[in-house]
Image (spheres, grey):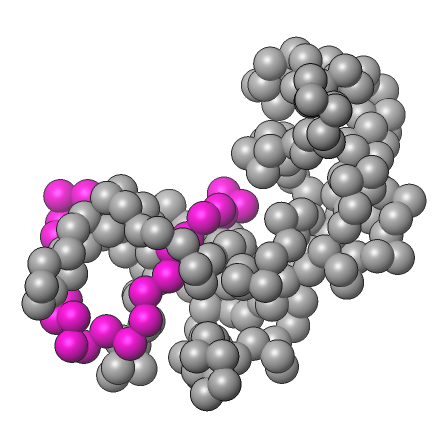
């Protein structure tokens, strides 16, 4: 999706609810100038995109999905260019493409996401395993190519075929120390030899 389409959707959302961009920002708990037209271009003349956090605030306040948000934009016909691979957590399996050595997502569904990159994919939590942090229906966006630091939430694919969501603590030469995403004091040790892949969760819809 183009820069203009994202800002158009923000403006249409404000208009739909009889708000100015400033009032929309305040309602979402953001700085009043967050969505102002003067903030859409940087001092150096480059385009400034709204942050994923600010868009997420709007989705939460108005209880709408990404699809509903983007449908407000006049550039909706380009939504395929702003989409990333998508699968439900219960259906997720690790299938590595032998050529790219990345997760094979070519036959997955698509979901709209503003920060379109080939290294991103989305997973919908469709069970209560990670409640209350991730409720059923929560969309998590995952990066295949991202540095992982202490405190990051991650998805871990084990060679056994099991898939888990954890909070990363540290790594030793032989094992990974992680914690429960709902309780950081509940630690788990996983042998490095048992891990097939680990990716970082960069965003969630709740």
Q: Going by the image, does 47 lie left or right of 187?
A: right
In percent of width and height, residue 73 lies at 85, 43
Image label count: 0
In percent of width and height, residue 39 lies at 71, 19
Q: Does the magenta stretch include residue 46?
A: no
Which residue is painted at 44% across and 63% down in the image? Answer: 144
Q: Which quadrant of the view contains residue 96?
A: bottom left
- In the orientation shown, which residue stands out farthest toward the front? 44
Which residue is painted at 58% across and 38% down in the image? Answer: 52
- In the orientation shown, which residue stands out farthest toward the right? 74
Q: Going by the image, does 164 lie left or right of 75?
A: left
Q: Is the magenta stretch mostly helix, strand or loop?
A: strand
Along the viewing direction, whichever of 131 and 116 lies nearer the viewer = 116
Along the viewing direction, whichever of 46 and 57 lies nearer the viewer = 46
Along the viewing direction, whichever of 127 and 26 lies nearer the viewer = 26
- In the orientation shown, which residue stands out farthest toward the bottom? 98
Q: Which quadrant of the view contains residue 150?
A: top left
| Residue 60 can be seen in this image | no
In percent of width and height, residue 142 lies at 47, 57
| Residue 151 can be seen in this image | yes
- Magenta span of residues: 181-206
Q: Going by the image, does 84 lie left or right of 1?
A: left
In percent of width and height, residue 46 lies at 72, 29
Which residue is painted at 46% across and 87% down in the image? Answer: 98
């Amino acid at each position: 999706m183009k820069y203009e389409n994202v800002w158009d959707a923000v403006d249409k959302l404000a208009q739909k609810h009889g708000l100015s961009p400033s009032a929309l920002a305040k309602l979402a708990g953001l700085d009043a100038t967050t969505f102002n037209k003067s903030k859409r271009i940087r001092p150096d003349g480059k385009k400034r995109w709204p942050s994923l956090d600010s868009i997420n605030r709007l989705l939460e306040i108005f209880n709408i999905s990404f699809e509903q948000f983007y449908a407000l934009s006049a550039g909706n016909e380009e939504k395929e260019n702003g989409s990333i691979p998508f699968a439900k957590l219960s259906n997720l399996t690790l299938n590595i493409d032998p050529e790219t050595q990345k997760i094979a997502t070519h036959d997955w569904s698509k979901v709209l996401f503003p920060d379109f990159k080939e290294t991103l994919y989305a997973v919908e939590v469709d069970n209560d395993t990670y409640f209350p942090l991730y409720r059923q229906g929560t969309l998590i966006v995952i990066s295949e190519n991202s540095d992982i630091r202490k405190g990051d939430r991650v998805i871990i694919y084990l060679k056994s075929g099991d898939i888990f969501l954890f909070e990363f603590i540290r790594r030793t030469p032989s094992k990974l120390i992680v914690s429960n995403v709902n309780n950081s004091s509940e630690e788990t040790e996983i042998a490095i030899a048992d891990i097939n892949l680990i990716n970082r969760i960069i965003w969630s819809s709740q």
